[in-house]
Amino acid sequence: MGDKGEKRIKLNENVQQEMSIQAGHDDAKNNNDIATQFVKFQMELDRKNDKYERLVKSSRDITIASKRCIFLLHRALNDSSKQEEVLLEAKNKLDEIQIKQWSKIIAEVDNDDRYLYARAYWPGLEEFVEAMTYYYYLKESKLISLSQFIDLAPLPGKLLTAYDFAAGIADLSGELMRLCINASGSGGESRCYRICVFIRVIYKRFVGLSKKIKGLTKKCHQVQQNLAKIENTCYELKLRKAEVLPSA
């Protein structure tokens, strides 16, 4: 092999060596870029997970506060002379839940996709709707509309969907069932009959909605069960009344 051949071989070896070095630099750069991307992904996931946990905690606090408000409203019925006072106290507590708790949730999800975190705050939202609708029923003797709810509770109203509102109304039927049973033992016969008529109307609406919205089937069954207990209570009241009527 001549000098030219040796030079050609040496040149090829140098080129291959340079290409290997360059490839190594490129691989290192690509690996660094990938690692950087994964660090960004990790930071974003950590941010979302931390936010989710904060929302779960806030939702739990709202659930507890809403339940306490419902218990307060139930106790008010034991003393009719204090009903207006207790209704005012309940309204103040509901407003306080908005200011202290719902403002935190709104601040957390306002700039993000709220449906991404819906499962975190939904339990608190459903319980709050139940408390709010129960308060409104005791005060006005009728069901609050969705637009009225948003007017009275604008902060949770930003997150409220028609489905959430319907789910809260289904839970309201359970509170009215308890109200009916308690009233039946304390001379509230007329209240029991009014509740029965009211829940029958709600159940009819749920039957229609559950055929269109699959998720409401379970809630419709819940309303049906509560209605059956209310009707049974009213039936027992009628029987008691018939037993004490004087014979002809």
Image (spheres, rainbow, N blue to C red):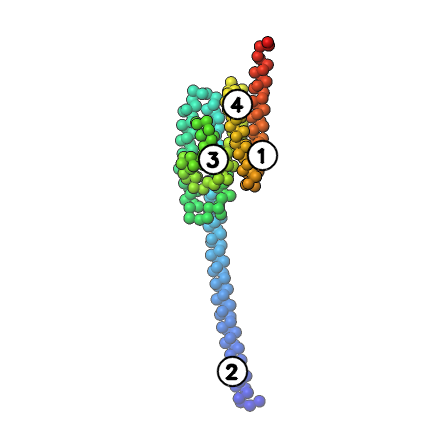
Distance from the alpha carbon under mark 2 to that under mark 3 = 80 Å
Q: Amino acid at mark 3?
A: Val
Disc 3: which residue = 129
**Crowd rating for badge 3 (residues with CA inside 10 Å; few <14, some 14–19, many 20+):** many
Q: How many marks?
A: 4
Q: Nearer the viewer, residue 6 or 50?
A: 50
**Crowd rating for badge 2 (residues with CA inside 10 Å; few <14, some 14–19, many 20+):** few
Say whether disc 4 or disc 3 marks the residue closer to the N-terminus: 3
Residue placed at 40% from the left, 27% from the top?
88
Q: Could you say which disc has been placed on residue 221 in the image?
A: 1
The relative height of residue 172 versus residue 240 in the rendered view (above or below) is below
Which label lies toward us, 1 or 2? 1
Rendered image quadrant of residue 208: top right
Disc 2: which residue = 11
Distance from the alpha carbon under mark 4 to that under mark 1 = 21 Å
Secondary structure found at label 3: helix
> Where residue 197 sits: x, y (%)?
52, 26
Secondary structure found at label 1: helix
> Where residue 177 sits: x, y (%)?
54, 27
Q: Is residue 154 visible?
A: yes
> Where residue 106 sits: x, y (%)?
42, 43
Secondary structure found at label 2: helix
Which label lies toward us, 4 or 3? 4
Residue placed at 41% from the left, 24% from the top?
84
**Crowd rating for badge 1 (residues with CA inside 10 Å; few <14, some 14–19, many 20+):** some
